[in-house]
Amino acid sequence: MPDGGTLRVSCAIRTPEAADVGAVVEATVEDTGQGMTVEFLRDHLFKPFSSTKKGGLGLGLYTSREIVNRQGGSIEVRSEPGRGSRFEIAFPPAGPEVGRP
C-alpha cells in the first residue's frame, strides 16, 4: 500500500453446519491497497519469480501457498483494482496426530 491504507488481520475457528466436514482454523488478511486485476491473479499470483516489486524475487506468496497446502490448508484470494485484496487462509485444526511419523 504505497499510498497508505488499512490492513486487517483476523483469526477464527469456523465450525461448518455439515456434519461430515470438520472445523477449520481461518486467518484473513485484508487491505485497502491497489488491488489486483483478474489477469494478474490468473497469470502471476503465486508464480515463483514473478514480482511487481523492484528487486523482489516473487517467492513470498509462492512459498506461503506451498506451506499452507502441505499442512492440508487452502488460500482463497479476492481482489479488485483500486479497492484492495483479501486473502483467506484455512487450515484443519491441529490434533494429537499432527507431527507424528
Image (cartoon, helix red, strand yellow):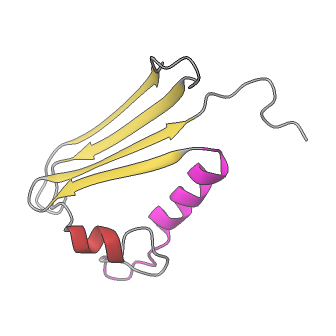
Tell me the residue at 30%/67% (across/down). 41
Total numbered badges shown on the rendered structure: 0
Closer-to-camera residue (18/10):
18
Please provide the residue range marked out in magenta. 53-72
Q: Going by the picture, which residue comes out furthest to the right?
A: 101
Quadrant including the N terminus:
bottom left
**Residue 17 falls in image quadrant:** top left
Q: Is residue 54 magenta?
A: yes
**Residue 96 falls in image quadrant:** top right
| Residue 100 drawn at (x, y percent) | 87, 36
Taking 61 as reference, is 41 left or right?
left
Asked if 9 appears above or below 19 in the picture, the reply is below
Closer-to-camera residue (15/93):
15
Tell me the residue at 46%/21% (across/down). 16
Closer-to-camera residue (61/3):
61
Tell me the residue at 45%/75% (across/down). 47
Quadrant including the C terminus:
top right
Asked if 61 appears above or below 27 in the picture, the reply is below
